Amino acid sequence: MSLYRELLDGFERDMTDAAKKHRLREEKVLGVRSRVNGIPTLFINGVRCQGATGPVDDEELRKAIGAALAERSR
């Protein structure tokens, strides 16, 4: 069996599992409340990390992590 078929079968099984459907709904609600509209969405210490013009680039991410570490050490 191909990996694709295994993944698709697992997905179809999961989509009919009531507990997994409930968990997925809960996760969706959390995402909507946090204004997550795509993945990956990064949060550092509960603050959404967002790029100035789109996705976070390396430099913006480094600054956000540095600021969080500086705040933590105060």
Image (spheres, rainbow, N blue to C red):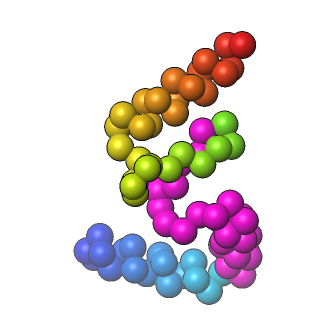
Image vertical order of residue 63 relative to residue 44, above or below: above
Image vertical order of residue 38 relative to residue 72, above or below: below
Residue sitting farthest toward the left: 2
Residue 27 is one of the magenta-drawn residues = yes
> What quarter of the picture does the C terminus occupy?
top right
Q: Nearer the viewer, residue 27 or 69?
A: 69
Tell me if residue 27 can be seen: no
> What quarter of the picture does the N terminus occupy?
bottom left
Q: Decide if residue 14 is on the left or right side of residue 59.
A: right
Residue sitting farthest toward the front: 52
User: Residue 35: which quarter of the image?
Assistant: bottom right
User: Residue 68: which quarter of the image?
Assistant: top right
Residue displayed at 72% across by 65% down: 33
User: Residue 2: which quarter of the image?
Assistant: bottom left
Q: Position of residue 3 (x, y in %)?
A: 29, 70
Which stretch did the figure color magenta? 18-44
